[in-house]
Structures are given as structure tokens and as C-alpha cells.
Image (tube, rainbow, N blue to C red):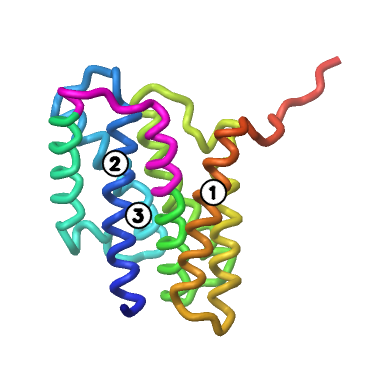
Amino acid sequence: MDIFTILLYLDLLGTIVFAVSGLLAANGKRLDLFGAVFIAMVTAIGGGTLRDLILGEPVFWVLNNIYIYLVIATTFVVFIIARYRNFPVQLILYFDALGLAVFTVLGAHKALELGFSLPIAIITGVMTGAFGGVIRDVLVGEVPLIFRKEIYATASFFGGLIYVWLQSTNLPVEVPIIVSILFIFILRTWAVKLNKSLPVFDFHRH
């Protein structure tokens, strides 16, 4: 399987899991079907949209409408299932962590392919992975995870760093992708499970 096929499948997977994470985050907000589709859509394509705009590229879902259809189909499936059974609350953790991992790698890869520097590739990876979740949290009335003390953007940053470093080696093309995705996913889920977090930025008051 060539690199382009791998990245396409990862892109579609990331779109599905982030759409689901958006729907799970909106659970209990009493959204109608249109509201559910909207939340799923901005969660799934928000990060990639920002990435393409900053890199000066055509927005990916404008060129290929499969992402729109995929989000709508995912929303319908989850919407129907949710009427008959409850989703475990912790399910959002795994979907969100996987989406963060996949989109971080895709964002960093696209910047490298376009010839941007390593720091730009890492930052682009973080934006691609985290920005959809920022929009999702704002729309459902939550403080975005990226602004909390949780290890979220940090996992994305170091995962992106690992990816661009491994890309400079002679390893098979699949290795940097797999290693980086696993690193981000494991670090994010580990941090939540064990309640690990970063220090809170706060001025000392006398």
C-alpha cells in the first residue's frame, strides 16, 4: 500500500472519529438533527480547513465532497443509535484522542510535502489536530481542551515533533505515521486516565 492510500484512509478515519467525538460532546445539549450535523461537521473539518487556509492551499473538502457526505452519514448513524442506547461517557476520550493523533500527523505531513520548514509542519499539525475540537467545545459551551491544563495540545506537539524527525530518517514511510499516531493516542489517554496535567499559568499574588 503506497503512502497516498495510507494517508487517504487515515484522513477518512479521522473525519469519522472526530465527527463522532463532536456528537458525543454535544450529548445532552438537546440538539436537533441539523444542529448535530453542524457540530459534527465543524469538529471533523475545522482543523483541516484552518490548515489549508494558512498554507495557501485549496480547502480539502471543497475539492473533494466525500468528507461532507461522510460526516452527514456518520451523524445519521450515531443519531439513530443514540435513540436506542446510551454511549459510554468515556467513549469521547478515545474518539477524540484518535482524531487528534490522526489529524496531527496529516497536518504535519501536508506542510512537509509543500516544502515548509519543520517548525511550520509541527505547528500545522497541532492546528489540524486541535482546532476542530476548539470549535466543538466553544459551540457546546465548554472551555476548549487546548486551553485547559490537560495534556492535549502538548501530546499533539510532541507527536508532530516525532513525526517530522522520523520523516528525515530512512525508515519505511509507514513507520513515522504509526509511531506518531500511537504516541499521541497513548499519551493523551494515559494523561486522562491518570489525571495527569500541566501546571496552570497563574501569577503569584501577595
Q: Residue at x 33, y 53 (%)?
A: 14
Specify which label sits upstream in the sequence, 3 or 1: 3
Q: In which quarter of the image is the C terminus?
A: top right
Q: Residue at x 39, y 57 (%)?
A: 51
**Bounds of the magenta segment:** 82-99
> Any mark on residue 124, and which?
none
Give the class, few, some or many, for how many residues have Cα within 10 Å of label 2's Cα (few <14, many ≥20): many
Describe the element under mark 1 as helix, strand or loop. Answer: helix
Q: Nearer the viewer, residue 147 or 52?
A: 147
Label 3–label 1 contact, CB within 8 A? no
The answer to which image quadrant residue 188 occupies is: top right
Give the class, few, some or many, for how many residues have Cα within 10 Å of label 3's Cα (few <14, many ≥20): many
Residue topped by disc 2: 42
Q: Label 2 to label 3, Cα distance in Å?
A: 10 Å
| Residue 15 image position (x, y, % from top left) | 29, 51
Q: Nearer the viewer, residue 178 or 14?
A: 178
| Residue 20 image position (x, y, % from top left) | 29, 39
Q: Is residue 85 left or right of residue 135?
A: left
Describe the element under mark 3 as helix, strand or loop. Answer: helix
The answer to which image quadrant residue 43 occupies is: top left
Give the class, few, some or many, for how many residues have Cα within 10 Å of label 1's Cα (few <14, many ≥20): some
Residue topped by disc 1: 186
